[in-house]
Amino acid sequence: MRAPEVRAGGSPRGELPLVHIHYRRLPDREQVFRQVVLEDAGDYVVTWLPAAGLPKPVMAGGRTVLEPGAPVVWITYRNRWHDVGRFHLADGTFTGVYANVLTPVEMDGGRWTTTDLCLDLWSGADGTLVVLDEDELRAAEAERWVTPELASRARDEAAALLQAARAGRWPGPEVHEWTLERAREAVSRGASPATDRG
């Protein structure tokens, strides 16, 4: 699951670059998300969504984890099979960390491309830890929208993230460091990815 793009008029001002994320969903849907780059750290890129244009709240572990109009800080990794979003309520309350299992993001300048592989891991601020949407992956397999090899790779990634989370090794320090407050400060300064290291 990837939160919808910036609502009309919601883009932050300043000199920060934009990326257009071409996000494919099985079997053949594609959405394009436009987000501001806050930092390019080499191994990962931090992007900013000031207001999620959701039709309804996102639920995980029986709780609302992302509301319409809520901000999201995204961490997208190079050569990894997942990305990470720091989720909030509309008032800015941090709810937890949401990992999408996906194909490694192809970053070609301001155009990024990836395919969602259904599975997600939710790590809530309340301690909830759960893998989501296994039913979606099974359905994709049944419809032959995904190869057995790709489905297996997605399950391996979700299992590895879950194990690392239980051991306290996930999410990484960059996810903890890129708080909502830091993201808003970076936007207000109009900091460039090369200089915004906090």
Image (spheres, helix red, strand yellow):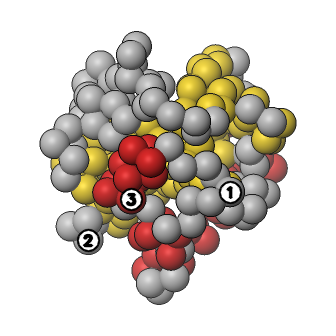
For badge 2, the amino acid type reads Gly
Q: Residue at x 36, y 30 (%)?
A: 52
Q: Do callouts 1 and 3 mark residues in contact (Cβ within 8 Å)?
A: no
Q: Residue at x 44, y 69 (%)?
A: 177
Find the distance from the CA under tag 1 to the CA under tag 2: 34 Å
Amino acid type, residue under disc 3 in the picture: Arg
Q: Which mark is residue 133?
A: none
Mark 3 surroundings within 10 Å by alpha-carbon count, few (fewer than 14), some (14 through 19), many (20 or more): some
**Of the image marks 2 and 3, the number of the one nearer the N terminus:** 2
* Mark 2 and mark 3 residues within 8 Å of each other at the beta carbon: no
Element at badge 1? loop
Label 2 and label 3: CA atoms lie apart by 23 Å
> Badge 3 is on which residue?
182
Question: What's the mark number on residue 194?
Answer: 1
Instruction: Judge by depth and name the residue closer to the eye, 58 or 142.
Output: 58
Q: Position of residue 109 (x, y in %)?
A: 80, 36
From the viewer's perspective, is residue 11 above or below residue 100? above
Can residue 143 be seen by looking at this rendering?
A: no
> Viewer-proximal residue, 130 or 105?
105
Residue matched to label 2 = 127
Report how many numbered discs are placed on residues in the image: 3
Q: Position of residue 6 (x, y in %)?
A: 44, 25
Task: Of the two numbered discs 1 and 2 on the same chain, state the one appearing first in sequence.
Answer: 2
Q: Nearer the viewer, mark 1 or mark 3?
A: 1
> Residue type at mark 1?
Ala
Q: Residue at x 80, y 41 (%)?
A: 106
Residue displayed at 50% across by 76% down: 173
Residue situated in front as seen by the camera: 155 or 51: 51
In the image, taking residue 77 as reference, residue 177 lies left or right, namely left
Left or right of residue 67, residue 144 in this image: right
User: Around disc 2, counting alpha carbons within 10 Å, would you say few (fewer than 14), some (14 to 19), or many (20 or more)?
Assistant: few
Nearer-N-terminus badge (1/3): 3
